[in-house]
Protein backbone atom coordinates (compact mmCIF):
# COMPACT_ATOMS: atom_id res chain seq x y z
CA UNK A 1 0.00 0.00 0.00
CA UNK A 2 1.30 3.43 -0.85
CA UNK A 3 0.21 6.82 0.39
CA UNK A 4 -0.14 9.59 -2.18
CA UNK A 5 0.81 13.01 -0.91
CA UNK A 6 -2.23 15.06 0.02
CA UNK A 7 -3.01 18.13 -1.96
CA UNK A 8 -4.00 21.51 -0.72
CA UNK A 9 -4.40 22.09 3.01
CA UNK A 10 -3.44 18.61 4.21
CA UNK A 11 -0.12 18.49 2.27
CA UNK A 12 2.02 19.52 5.24
CA UNK A 13 0.32 17.10 7.66
CA UNK A 14 0.94 14.11 5.43
CA UNK A 15 4.53 15.07 4.71
CA UNK A 16 5.24 15.18 8.44
CA UNK A 17 3.65 11.77 8.99
CA UNK A 18 5.69 10.18 6.18
CA UNK A 19 8.95 11.75 7.23
CA UNK A 20 8.56 10.90 10.89
CA UNK A 21 7.39 7.37 10.17
CA UNK A 22 10.28 6.46 7.92
CA UNK A 23 12.85 8.20 10.08
CA UNK A 24 11.75 6.42 13.22
CA UNK A 25 11.38 2.95 11.79
CA UNK A 26 14.52 3.01 9.68
CA UNK A 27 16.68 3.73 12.72
CA UNK A 28 16.13 0.26 14.18
CA UNK A 29 17.48 1.40 17.52
CA UNK A 30 14.50 0.70 19.64
CA UNK A 31 11.96 -2.14 19.68
CA UNK A 32 8.28 -1.36 19.38
CA UNK A 33 7.51 -2.91 22.73
CA UNK A 34 10.00 -0.65 24.44
CA UNK A 35 8.63 2.48 22.82
CA UNK A 36 4.99 1.65 23.51
CA UNK A 37 5.38 1.81 27.27
CA UNK A 38 7.97 4.59 27.59
CA UNK A 39 7.17 8.10 28.79
CA UNK A 40 3.41 7.76 28.39
CA UNK A 41 2.78 9.99 31.36
CA UNK A 42 5.25 12.56 30.01
CA UNK A 43 3.35 12.75 26.75
CA UNK A 44 0.03 13.20 28.56
CA UNK A 45 1.38 15.94 30.80
CA UNK A 46 3.05 17.72 27.88
CA UNK A 47 -0.17 17.62 25.87
CA UNK A 48 -2.24 18.91 28.79
CA UNK A 49 0.24 21.74 29.35
CA UNK A 50 0.33 22.70 25.69
CA UNK A 51 -3.45 22.90 25.31
CA UNK A 52 -4.18 24.73 28.54
CA UNK A 53 -2.25 27.92 27.84
CA UNK A 54 -4.08 31.22 27.57
CA UNK A 55 -4.68 32.71 24.11
CA UNK A 56 -2.72 35.93 23.66
CA UNK A 57 -4.49 38.82 21.97
CA UNK A 58 -2.34 41.10 19.85
CA UNK A 59 -3.15 44.20 17.81
CA UNK A 60 -0.09 43.67 15.64
CA UNK A 61 -0.60 42.53 12.07
CA UNK A 62 -0.12 38.84 11.44
CA UNK A 63 3.28 37.87 10.03
CA UNK A 64 3.26 36.58 6.47
CA UNK A 65 4.84 33.29 7.49
CA UNK A 66 3.18 31.28 10.25
CA UNK A 67 5.68 29.08 12.07
CA UNK A 68 4.53 25.59 12.94
CA UNK A 69 4.59 24.76 16.65
CA UNK A 70 7.38 22.63 18.01
CA UNK A 71 6.52 18.96 18.37
CA UNK A 72 7.87 16.97 21.30
CA UNK A 73 9.87 13.84 20.58
CA UNK A 74 7.31 11.36 21.89
CA UNK A 75 4.60 12.81 19.66
CA UNK A 76 6.90 12.23 16.68
CA UNK A 77 7.51 8.70 17.93
CA UNK A 78 3.77 8.05 18.14
CA UNK A 79 3.26 9.37 14.61
CA UNK A 80 5.94 7.00 13.40
CA UNK A 81 4.40 4.03 15.20
CA UNK A 82 0.94 4.78 13.82
CA UNK A 83 2.21 5.16 10.28
CA UNK A 84 4.16 1.91 10.43
CA UNK A 85 1.36 -0.13 11.97
CA UNK A 86 -1.12 1.12 9.38
CA UNK A 87 1.40 0.19 6.70
CA UNK A 88 2.28 -3.26 8.07
CA UNK A 89 -1.28 -4.33 8.97
CA UNK A 90 -0.11 -7.31 10.99
CA UNK A 91 -3.03 -9.63 11.76
CA UNK A 92 -2.75 -11.36 15.13
CA UNK A 93 -3.84 -14.89 16.03
CA UNK A 94 -3.29 -16.09 12.45
CA UNK A 95 -1.36 -19.10 13.77
CA UNK A 96 -4.40 -20.20 15.75
CA UNK A 97 -7.00 -19.27 13.10
CA UNK A 98 -5.17 -19.90 9.85
CA UNK A 99 -8.14 -19.51 7.52
CA UNK A 100 -11.49 -17.76 7.57
CA UNK A 101 -14.54 -18.54 5.46
CA UNK A 102 -14.44 -16.37 2.33
CA UNK A 103 -16.36 -13.10 2.70
CA UNK A 104 -17.30 -13.87 6.30
CA UNK A 105 -18.18 -11.10 8.73
CA UNK A 106 -15.75 -8.31 9.58
CA UNK A 107 -16.38 -6.45 12.83
CA UNK A 108 -14.88 -2.94 13.14
CA UNK A 109 -14.72 -1.31 16.57
CA UNK A 110 -14.13 2.45 16.86
CA UNK A 111 -12.04 2.93 19.99
CA UNK A 112 -11.17 6.09 21.91
CA UNK A 113 -10.00 5.84 25.51
CA UNK A 114 -12.41 3.88 27.69
CA UNK A 115 -10.65 0.59 28.43
CA UNK A 116 -13.27 -0.51 30.98
CA UNK A 117 -16.00 -0.50 28.35
CA UNK A 118 -13.73 -2.04 25.74
CA UNK A 119 -13.12 -4.93 28.15
CA UNK A 120 -16.89 -5.43 28.45
CA UNK A 121 -17.26 -5.49 24.67
CA UNK A 122 -14.50 -8.08 24.32
CA UNK A 123 -16.13 -10.15 27.05
CA UNK A 124 -19.36 -10.20 25.05
CA UNK A 125 -17.56 -11.09 21.83
CA UNK A 126 -15.80 -13.97 23.54
CA UNK A 127 -19.19 -15.52 24.34
CA UNK A 128 -20.55 -15.25 20.80
CA UNK A 129 -21.05 -18.46 18.87
CA UNK A 130 -19.13 -18.49 15.57
CA UNK A 131 -16.82 -15.68 16.66
CA UNK A 132 -13.77 -17.62 15.46
CA UNK A 133 -14.85 -16.93 11.86
CA UNK A 134 -14.69 -13.13 12.00
CA UNK A 135 -11.90 -10.64 11.45
CA UNK A 136 -12.00 -8.18 14.38
CA UNK A 137 -10.59 -4.74 13.58
CA UNK A 138 -9.95 -2.16 16.29
CA UNK A 139 -9.71 1.38 14.91
CA UNK A 140 -8.04 3.67 17.47
CA UNK A 141 -7.72 7.45 17.77
CA UNK A 142 -5.73 7.28 21.01
CA UNK A 143 -2.49 5.42 21.67
CA UNK A 144 -2.50 3.77 25.08
CA UNK A 145 -0.56 0.79 26.50
CA UNK A 146 -3.57 0.03 28.69
CA UNK A 147 -5.89 -0.19 25.69
CA UNK A 148 -3.34 -2.27 23.78
CA UNK A 149 -3.20 -4.68 26.70
CA UNK A 150 -6.98 -5.03 26.63
CA UNK A 151 -6.89 -5.76 22.90
CA UNK A 152 -4.13 -8.29 23.49
CA UNK A 153 -6.56 -10.41 25.53
CA UNK A 154 -8.47 -11.28 22.35
CA UNK A 155 -7.51 -14.88 21.60
CA UNK A 156 -10.72 -16.10 19.99
CA UNK A 157 -10.38 -14.74 16.42
CA UNK A 158 -8.08 -12.90 14.04
CA UNK A 159 -7.34 -9.33 15.14
CA UNK A 160 -6.07 -6.22 13.37
CA UNK A 161 -5.38 -2.81 14.92
CA UNK A 162 -5.45 0.34 12.80
CA UNK A 163 -4.90 3.91 13.96
CA UNK A 164 -6.47 7.19 12.87
CA UNK A 165 -3.36 9.13 11.77
CA UNK A 166 -4.72 12.65 12.40
CA UNK A 167 -5.81 12.40 16.01
CA UNK A 168 -5.57 15.10 18.65
CA UNK A 169 -2.96 13.00 20.42
CA UNK A 170 -0.71 13.05 17.33
CA UNK A 171 -1.30 16.78 16.67
CA UNK A 172 -1.77 18.27 20.15
CA UNK A 173 -0.75 21.85 19.28
CA UNK A 174 -1.83 22.16 15.67
CA UNK A 175 -4.73 21.26 13.42
CA UNK A 176 -6.49 18.85 13.50
CA UNK A 177 -5.75 19.14 17.21
CA UNK A 178 -5.91 22.33 19.26
CA UNK A 179 -3.85 25.06 17.64
CA UNK A 180 -3.12 27.93 20.07
CA UNK A 181 -3.92 30.32 17.21
CA UNK A 182 -7.42 28.90 16.69
CA UNK A 183 -10.38 31.09 17.53
CA UNK A 184 -12.08 30.60 20.92
CA UNK A 185 -15.36 28.71 20.54
CA UNK A 186 -17.73 31.52 21.54
CA UNK A 187 -15.98 34.60 20.20
CA UNK A 188 -18.14 36.66 17.79
CA UNK A 189 -16.90 36.57 14.20
CA UNK A 190 -16.20 40.32 14.09
CA UNK A 191 -13.98 40.00 17.16
CA UNK A 192 -12.32 36.90 15.73
CA UNK A 193 -11.43 38.84 12.59
CA UNK A 194 -9.89 41.60 14.71
CA UNK A 195 -8.00 39.03 16.74
CA UNK A 196 -6.65 37.45 13.58
CA UNK A 197 -7.08 33.86 14.73
CA UNK A 198 -6.58 31.19 12.08
CA UNK A 199 -10.17 30.15 11.42
CA UNK A 200 -11.87 33.52 11.93
CA UNK A 201 -13.66 33.27 8.57
CA UNK A 202 -15.21 29.88 9.33
CA UNK A 203 -17.57 29.68 12.30
CA UNK A 204 -20.33 27.08 12.19
CA UNK A 205 -24.02 27.70 11.53
CA UNK A 206 -24.48 28.95 15.10
CA UNK A 207 -21.49 31.31 15.11
CA UNK A 208 -19.24 28.95 17.08
CA UNK A 209 -15.71 27.89 16.21
CA UNK A 210 -14.45 24.31 16.05
CA UNK A 211 -13.61 22.20 19.06
CA UNK A 212 -11.16 19.45 18.18
CA UNK A 213 -12.53 16.95 20.70
CA UNK A 214 -15.89 17.01 18.90
CA UNK A 215 -14.54 17.17 15.36
CA UNK A 216 -12.31 14.14 15.85
CA UNK A 217 -15.09 11.54 16.09
CA UNK A 218 -16.58 12.38 12.69
CA UNK A 219 -13.10 12.46 11.14
CA UNK A 220 -12.26 9.08 12.64
CA UNK A 221 -15.52 7.49 11.50
CA UNK A 222 -15.12 8.56 7.87
CA UNK A 223 -11.41 7.71 7.72
CA UNK A 224 -12.08 4.30 9.27
CA UNK A 225 -14.83 3.53 6.78
CA UNK A 226 -12.58 4.31 3.83
CA UNK A 227 -9.47 2.65 5.25
CA UNK A 228 -11.23 -0.63 6.04
CA UNK A 229 -12.88 -0.98 2.63
CA UNK A 230 -10.06 0.43 0.51
CA UNK A 231 -6.75 0.04 2.33
CA UNK A 232 -6.85 -3.06 4.52
CA UNK A 233 -5.00 -5.56 2.37
CA UNK A 234 -6.76 -8.59 3.88
CA UNK A 235 -10.10 -7.16 2.68
CA UNK A 236 -9.07 -6.26 -0.85
CA UNK A 237 -11.61 -8.61 -2.41
CA UNK A 238 -14.04 -8.77 0.51
CA UNK A 239 -17.65 -8.98 -0.60
CA UNK A 240 -19.23 -9.78 2.73
CA UNK A 241 -20.65 -7.63 5.50
CA UNK A 242 -18.77 -5.15 7.68
CA UNK A 243 -20.35 -4.54 11.08
CA UNK A 244 -19.61 -1.13 12.64
CA UNK A 245 -19.67 -0.92 16.43
CA UNK A 246 -18.01 1.16 19.16
CA UNK A 247 -16.01 0.51 22.29
CA UNK A 248 -18.99 0.95 24.63
CA UNK A 249 -21.28 -1.56 22.92
CA UNK A 250 -22.16 -5.05 24.17
CA UNK A 251 -23.24 -7.87 21.85
CA UNK A 252 -25.58 -10.79 22.47
CA UNK A 253 -24.20 -14.34 22.11
CA UNK A 254 -26.22 -14.94 18.92
CA UNK A 255 -25.39 -11.70 17.07
CA UNK A 256 -23.26 -13.54 14.48
CA UNK A 257 -25.97 -16.17 13.99
CA UNK A 258 -28.61 -13.46 13.58
CA UNK A 259 -26.60 -11.50 11.01
CA UNK A 260 -26.13 -14.63 8.94
CA UNK A 261 -29.88 -15.24 8.94
CA UNK A 262 -30.64 -11.59 8.14
CA UNK A 263 -28.20 -11.73 5.23
CA UNK A 264 -30.01 -14.76 3.80
CA UNK A 265 -33.39 -13.13 4.35
CA UNK A 266 -32.22 -10.00 2.55
CA UNK A 267 -31.29 -12.01 -0.55
CA UNK A 268 -34.74 -13.57 -0.67
CA UNK A 269 -37.09 -10.82 0.44
CA UNK A 270 -35.30 -7.46 0.62
CA UNK A 271 -32.73 -7.08 -2.13
CA UNK A 272 -33.02 -3.30 -1.88
CA UNK A 273 -32.13 -3.21 1.84
CA UNK A 274 -29.01 -1.09 2.22
CA UNK A 275 -28.17 -1.75 5.86
CA UNK A 276 -28.65 -4.47 8.47
CA UNK A 277 -29.09 -3.39 12.09
CA UNK A 278 -28.76 -5.49 15.23
CA UNK A 279 -31.33 -3.36 17.03
CA UNK A 280 -32.13 -0.04 18.64
CA UNK A 281 -31.49 1.49 22.04
CA UNK A 282 -34.45 0.01 23.93
CA UNK A 283 -33.21 -2.47 26.56
CA UNK A 284 -36.07 -4.87 25.99
CA UNK A 285 -36.16 -8.60 26.36
CA UNK A 286 -36.24 -11.10 23.50
CA UNK A 287 -39.47 -12.84 24.48
CA UNK A 288 -41.81 -12.99 21.50
CA UNK A 289 -39.50 -10.86 19.33
CA UNK A 290 -36.29 -12.86 18.99
CA UNK A 291 -37.16 -14.14 15.51
CA UNK A 292 -38.75 -10.96 14.16
CA UNK A 293 -37.28 -8.20 12.00
CA UNK A 294 -38.65 -5.03 10.45
CA UNK A 295 -37.87 -3.33 7.16
CA UNK A 296 -38.17 0.44 7.22
CA UNK A 297 -36.46 3.75 6.47
CA UNK A 298 -33.07 4.14 8.13
CA UNK A 299 -32.98 6.71 10.95
CA UNK A 300 -29.81 7.89 12.63
CA UNK A 301 -31.44 8.01 16.06
CA UNK A 302 -32.56 4.39 15.86
CA UNK A 303 -30.21 2.47 13.59
CA UNK A 304 -26.74 3.91 14.11
CA UNK A 305 -25.66 1.15 16.50
CA UNK A 306 -24.62 -2.28 15.26
CA UNK A 307 -24.92 -1.20 11.63
CA UNK A 308 -23.71 -3.64 8.95
CA UNK A 309 -23.11 -2.59 5.36
CA UNK A 310 -21.98 -4.23 2.14
CA UNK A 311 -19.39 -3.02 -0.32
CA UNK A 312 -22.17 -1.83 -2.61
CA UNK A 313 -23.58 0.40 0.13
CA UNK A 314 -20.09 1.68 0.95
CA UNK A 315 -19.40 2.57 -2.68
CA UNK A 316 -22.61 4.59 -2.86
CA UNK A 317 -21.72 6.30 0.39
CA UNK A 318 -18.18 7.24 -0.61
CA UNK A 319 -19.53 8.97 -3.73
CA UNK A 320 -21.12 11.43 -1.32
CA UNK A 321 -17.80 12.41 0.26
CA UNK A 322 -18.18 16.12 -0.45
CA UNK A 323 -21.67 16.25 1.03
CA UNK A 324 -20.65 14.33 4.15
CA UNK A 325 -17.50 16.35 4.70
CA UNK A 326 -19.06 19.79 4.28
CA UNK A 327 -22.33 19.23 6.17
CA UNK A 328 -22.23 21.35 9.31
CA UNK A 329 -22.81 18.66 11.93
CA UNK A 330 -20.04 17.12 14.02
CA UNK A 331 -22.08 13.91 14.40
CA UNK A 332 -21.27 11.27 11.80
CA UNK A 333 -24.72 9.66 12.10
CA UNK A 334 -26.66 12.90 11.55
CA UNK A 335 -24.38 13.60 8.61
CA UNK A 336 -25.37 10.21 7.17
CA UNK A 337 -29.02 11.10 7.71
CA UNK A 338 -28.42 14.21 5.63
CA UNK A 339 -26.94 12.10 2.82
CA UNK A 340 -29.97 9.82 2.69
CA UNK A 341 -32.15 12.70 1.54
CA UNK A 342 -29.68 14.81 -0.45
CA UNK A 343 -27.04 12.66 -2.12
CA UNK A 344 -27.57 8.89 -2.06
CA UNK A 345 -29.36 7.40 -5.10
CA UNK A 346 -32.30 6.29 -2.93
CA UNK A 347 -33.52 6.59 0.63
CA UNK A 348 -31.74 4.09 2.86
CA UNK A 349 -33.75 1.01 3.77
CA UNK A 350 -32.74 -0.99 6.84
CA UNK A 351 -33.59 -4.47 8.08
CA UNK A 352 -33.55 -4.28 11.87
CA UNK A 353 -34.03 -6.86 14.61
CA UNK A 354 -37.04 -6.15 16.82
CA UNK A 355 -35.26 -7.70 19.80
CA UNK A 356 -31.86 -5.96 20.05
CA UNK A 357 -28.70 -8.06 19.90
CA UNK A 358 -26.58 -5.02 20.72
CA UNK A 359 -26.66 -2.84 23.82
CA UNK A 360 -25.23 0.58 24.56
CA UNK A 361 -23.26 0.11 27.75
CA UNK A 362 -21.66 3.55 27.66
CA UNK A 363 -23.31 5.92 30.11
CA UNK A 364 -20.46 8.41 29.88
CA UNK A 365 -18.39 9.96 27.15
CA UNK A 366 -18.72 12.78 24.62
CA UNK A 367 -22.49 13.26 25.04
CA UNK A 368 -22.68 12.36 28.73
CA UNK A 369 -21.32 14.31 31.68
CA UNK A 370 -21.93 11.77 34.44
CA UNK A 371 -19.25 9.39 35.70
CA UNK A 372 -18.64 6.09 33.94
CA UNK A 373 -20.29 3.11 35.63
CA UNK A 374 -19.52 0.07 33.43
CA UNK A 375 -20.28 -2.44 36.19
CA UNK A 376 -23.82 -1.08 36.59
CA UNK A 377 -24.53 -1.27 32.87
CA UNK A 378 -23.01 -4.74 32.72
CA UNK A 379 -25.42 -5.97 35.40
CA UNK A 380 -28.43 -4.55 33.54
CA UNK A 381 -27.46 -6.16 30.25
CA UNK A 382 -26.62 -9.51 31.86
CA UNK A 383 -30.02 -9.50 33.52
CA UNK A 384 -31.79 -8.98 30.18
CA UNK A 385 -29.82 -11.73 28.47
CA UNK A 386 -30.18 -14.14 31.38
CA UNK A 387 -33.96 -13.79 31.41
CA UNK A 388 -34.24 -14.35 27.66
CA UNK A 389 -31.50 -16.91 27.04
CA UNK A 390 -34.02 -19.49 25.78
CA UNK A 391 -35.08 -17.17 22.96
CA UNK A 392 -31.60 -16.74 21.47
CA UNK A 393 -30.52 -18.44 18.22
CA UNK A 394 -33.87 -18.50 16.39
CA UNK A 395 -34.20 -21.13 13.66
CA UNK A 396 -35.91 -18.75 11.24
CA UNK A 397 -36.75 -15.07 10.87
CA UNK A 398 -40.04 -13.37 10.16
CA UNK A 399 -40.49 -9.92 8.60
CA UNK A 400 -43.30 -8.35 10.63
CA UNK A 401 -43.20 -4.91 8.97
CA UNK A 402 -42.12 -3.96 5.47
CA UNK A 403 -42.51 -0.22 5.17
CA UNK A 404 -41.51 1.92 2.19
CA UNK A 405 -38.27 3.86 2.63
CA UNK A 406 -39.39 7.47 2.93
CA UNK A 407 -36.96 10.36 3.21
CA UNK A 408 -36.15 11.44 6.75
CA UNK A 409 -34.33 14.75 7.00
CA UNK A 410 -32.28 15.67 10.08
CA UNK A 411 -34.53 17.55 12.49
CA UNK A 412 -31.78 20.09 13.16
CA UNK A 413 -28.23 20.83 12.12
CA UNK A 414 -25.99 20.52 15.19
CA UNK A 415 -23.07 22.58 13.92
CA UNK A 416 -19.51 22.15 15.14
CA UNK A 417 -18.29 21.51 11.59
CA UNK A 418 -17.95 24.87 9.88
CA UNK A 419 -14.16 25.00 9.63
CA UNK A 420 -12.91 24.63 6.06
CA UNK A 421 -9.86 22.75 7.34
CA UNK A 422 -12.11 19.99 8.64
CA UNK A 423 -13.85 19.86 5.28
CA UNK A 424 -10.64 19.51 3.31
CA UNK A 425 -9.04 16.96 5.64
CA UNK A 426 -12.20 14.86 5.63
CA UNK A 427 -12.36 14.91 1.81
CA UNK A 428 -8.70 13.96 1.54
CA UNK A 429 -9.15 10.47 3.01
CA UNK A 430 -10.64 9.27 -0.25
CA UNK A 431 -7.42 10.21 -2.03
CA UNK A 432 -5.24 8.01 0.15
CA UNK A 433 -3.14 5.61 -1.89
Image (cartoon, rainbow, N blue to C red):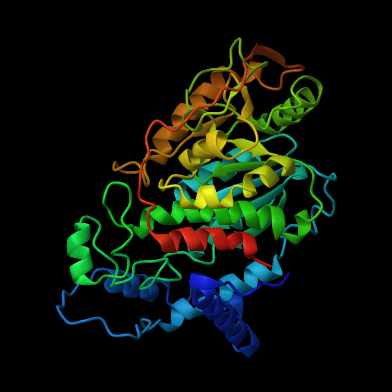
Give coordinates of residue 355: x percent, y percent.
58, 20
- Above or below, comparing residue 69 to residue 93 in the picture: below
- 172 left or right, relative to 259: left
Give 122 or 207, whichever is nearer the viewer.
Answer: 207
Q: In this view of the protein, can residue 433 be seen by the observer? A: yes
Q: Quadrant of the C terminus?
A: bottom right
Give coordinates of residue 415: x percent, y percent.
35, 46
Residue ID at (58%, 45%):
122
Q: In this view of the protein, can residue 111 be seen by the observer? A: no
Give coordinates of residue 328: x percent, y percent.
40, 47
- Above or below, comparing residue 361 to residue 206 in the picture: above
Give coordinates of residue 325: x percent, y percent.
50, 52
- Above or below, comparing residue 187 to residue 248 in the picture: below
Q: Quadrant of residue 306?
A: top right
Give 93 or 84, whichever is nearer the viewer.
Answer: 84
Give 120 or 23, whichever is nearer the viewer.
Answer: 23
Q: Quadrant of residue 273?
A: top right
- 282 left or right, relative to 45: right
- Above or below, comparing residue 349 to residue 371 in the picture: above
Residue ID at (70%, 46%):
315
Give 75 or 393, whichever is nearer the viewer.
Answer: 75
- 267 left or right, relative to 20: right
Amino acid sequence: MRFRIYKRKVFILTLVVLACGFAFWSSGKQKKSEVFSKDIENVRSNRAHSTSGNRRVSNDTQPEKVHKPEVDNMTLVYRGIVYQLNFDQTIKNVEKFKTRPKDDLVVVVQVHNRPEYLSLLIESLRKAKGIENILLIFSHDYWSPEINQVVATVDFCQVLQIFFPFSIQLYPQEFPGNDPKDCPRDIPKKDALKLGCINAEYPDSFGHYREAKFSQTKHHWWWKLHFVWERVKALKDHNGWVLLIEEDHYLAPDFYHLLQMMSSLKKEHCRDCDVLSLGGYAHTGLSGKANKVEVKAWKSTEHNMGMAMSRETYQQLIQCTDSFCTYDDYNWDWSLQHLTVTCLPSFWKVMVSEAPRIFHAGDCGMHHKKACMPSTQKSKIHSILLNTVNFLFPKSLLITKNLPAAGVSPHVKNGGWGDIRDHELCKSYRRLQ
